[in-house]
Image (cartoon, rainbow, N blue to C red):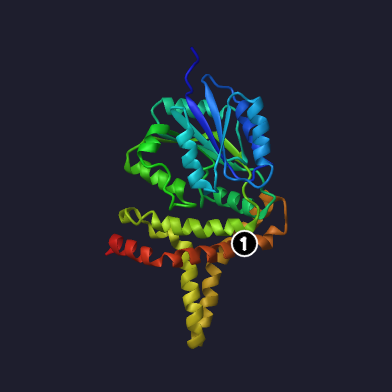
Amino acid sequence: MQEAITVSILIPAYNEEAYIEGCIKSILSQDTSFRYEIVVCDDCSTDATPQILEQLDQMIPELRTVKNDTNRGIIGTCNRLVEAARGEYFVRIDADSRLIPNSLQRIQSKLIGGYSLVFGKIEVKNTSYLHPAAAQVGKLKGRSTWYGGACFACDTQAFVDSGAFDKEMIGAEVQELKQRAQRLDWSVAYLDEAGVESNFPTALRPVLYRKYDSTRSHIRQYKNNPEEFNLWEVRGPMFWTTFVVVGLTSIVLPVLALLSLILLVVPFHQYVRDAPLAASVSGRRSFLLLYPLYEAVGGIVRMFGLWSDIDILIDVMAKKYI
């Protein structure tokens, strides 16, 4: 009798022709003591991803591929992958990532040891580009997490029973999952010795759209749980809102023009201070200038995300602080 599948490794894929084969091979090279399956869902890719998956599917017994009829986006695709999973547990990794050796065994050991949710560490690989370099700086400076959606594992049934991913939480789905795990009193593990090397997005337009969406989702996730809201978490967009208000007011009251310039010192002091680190991790001296500009633009984009759901933010803050 064939051994039951213990773990389903789930990979959402959209236009990943450059990375998908390397991702799958990094899984196959893992040393494991259990049976697993690899399930890839192609989200209507327009490049050669479907053809590559078709070829790999014929050669790799552990691999199953499914294809969306319409583009569902990352959350819809991840939820479909969980529905297709046969394992008691699932490990979700990004298609542009590669598993660090022995990660699967270490993650599975935590899962069978009683943890409902396990995160592996995410190392940024392609730091010669601006956004990946900025992401690595954020991790090194402690402003962003090493543990996110590029590598995490969960008890499959517990995930489904808790509601899977919320489709409204685009860009903040993993943060919402962490908060849900806390409310449900799940045991959560964070592993430094397991994880992925990830190729972060390099095209700035989709990156900025994601910053916009993630800010909106970050606010919306507190709509039903305002007591969990922390104003410090939206300090960036709140600062840029203050700057814009002061700047516009200075048109009527010129005396405030100096104040708006003084306000700019606050973020740019941090941006300029961190720019040498961005230049170091990327190996590109041009990032001494580009990094501060990128961070400023990102902050402004997040501000627009905050404004788009300002009614929800005001309601959440009123319930939390009044």
Q: Quadrant of the C terminus?
A: bottom left
Relative vertical location of residue 226 with respect to residue 252 in this rendering, above or below: above
Dividing the picture into quadrants, the one containing residue 297 is bottom right
Q: Where residue 163 sits: x, y (%)?
A: 37, 42
Q: Is residue 78 left or right of residue 13?
A: left
**What's the residue type where badge 1 is placed?**
Tyr
Residue located at (68% from left, 36% from top):
52
> How many residues crowd mark 1 within 10 Å: few (<14), some (14–19), many (20+)?
some
Residue 186's spot in the image, x, y percent? 35, 36
Place of residue 248 in the rendered image (x, y in percent of width and height, measured from the top left) = 50, 80
Residue at the outermost left position:
322
**Relative height, residue 243 to residue 24 (above, below):** below
The residue to which callout 1 is attached is: 294
Per the image, label 1 sits on a secondary structure element best described as helix
Residue at 68% from the left image edge and 37% from the top image edge: 51
Query: Could you tell me residue 95's position as x and y percent?
Result: 60, 40
Q: For residue 159, say whether it is visible.
A: yes
Asked whether residue 153 appears in the rendered view, the answer is: no
